[in-house]
Image (cartoon, rainbow, N blue to C red):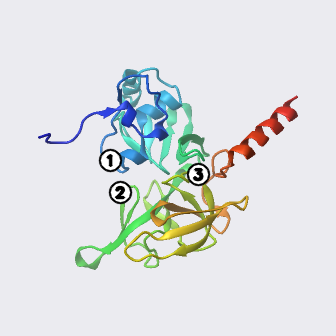
Amino acid sequence: MARGPKKHLKRLNAPKAWMLDKLGGVYAPRPSTGPHKLRECLPLVIFLRNRLKYALTGNEVMKIVKQRLIKVDGKVRTDPTYPAGFMDVVSIEKTNELFRLIYDVKGRFTIHRITPEEAKYKLCKVKQTGTGPKGVPYIVTHDGRTIRYPDPLIKVNDSIQLDIATTKIMDYIKFESGNLCMITGGRNLGRVGTIVSRERHPGSFDIVHIKDSTGHTFATRMNNVFIIGKGTKAYISLPRGKGIRLTIAEERDKRIAAKVAHH
């Protein structure tokens, strides 16, 4: 009988979003337990070494984080396998760089640099609402935060705009048709579009129909939808490609057009 928590993660079993090569070793860094799930997070070691190329080895990453140079959501994190996840703001003060972890259209975490103004807040999806002891209302967000005394109109699946420094709710966006959303799971991962309609299936998964800005429609499960803006106005800046997935033929045409323009 295997007892206790798993300590290792084989490389082939690591999430595809990390983009690790098969032959680069046997193991991958197993993320620590934390606010994001193992399959939906990006450990700091991969962000610093494989994405930003600030270190060549895991040992070097250890030396960087132990100097307390890396902050996630405004808090210094010294664990190289700390699970940073969707919407987290990673700041490196020494280089004055700020990043928000967002999926690109291929469903991978991209290096998305943001302005200091935008780094002051993040969006959180409301996972649960309830009342605590003595009737104190609270909400639980996708990154494991519990926020007490929220606006009573905030319901599950809405998004809140959270001030990182004070952890106060600045604003909230309802889950409604016509609002902008990003897909955070499934095969449409990373796509952005506006909600067209929602099919309710009691006892099963609610299906949400979404239309992107090029007019393509697609459907996904309710729990994969993350609201990022009111109407067509996004509350966060989007990475290159703006969350619009092209078909293979469209991508080819775009590449050819770029080539022609280049010559």
Q: Residue at x 50, y 25 (%)?
A: 54
Which quadrant of the structure image shows residue 1? top left
Of labels 3 and 1, the one closer to you: 1
Residue position for label 1: 34
Instruction: Give how far apart the Cα atoms at labels 2 and 3 are.
Output: 21 Å
- Is residue 162 or residue 103 the one in the foreground? 103
- Is residue 188 or residue 183 the one in the foreground? 188
Q: Is residue 135 left or right of residue 215?
A: left
The answer to whether residue 123 shows anywhere in this view is yes
Q: Residue at x 86, y 33 (%)?
A: 260
In primary-sequence order, the first of circles 3 and 1 is 1
Judge whether 79 appears above or below 72 on screen: above
Mark 2 surroundings within 10 Å by alpha-carbon count, few (fewer than 14), some (14 through 19), many (20 or more): some
Which image quarter is the C terminus in? top right
Q: Residue at x 52, y 55 (%)?
A: 121
Task: Say which amino acid is labelled 1.
Answer: Gly
Instruction: Give how far apart the Cα atoms at labels 3 and 1 are.
Output: 24 Å
Task: Say which amino acid is labelled 2.
Answer: Gly
What percent of the width, then of the height, locates residue 92? 50, 36
Mark 3 surroundings within 10 Å by alpha-carbon count, few (fewer than 14), some (14 through 19), many (20 or more): some
Q: Which mark is residue 118?
A: 3
Residue position for label 2: 144
Q: Residue at x 53, y 42 (%)?
A: 108
Instruction: Give how far apart the Cα atoms at labels 2 and 1 are.
Output: 8 Å
What percent of the width, then of the height, locates residue 209? 58, 68
Q: Is residue 82 left or right of residue 208?
A: left
In primary-sequence order, the first of circles 2 and 1 is 1
> Seen from this angle, which residue lies furthest front?
249
Judge whether 163 appears above or below 70 on screen: below
**Cβ atoms under marks 2 and 1 closer than 8 Å:** yes
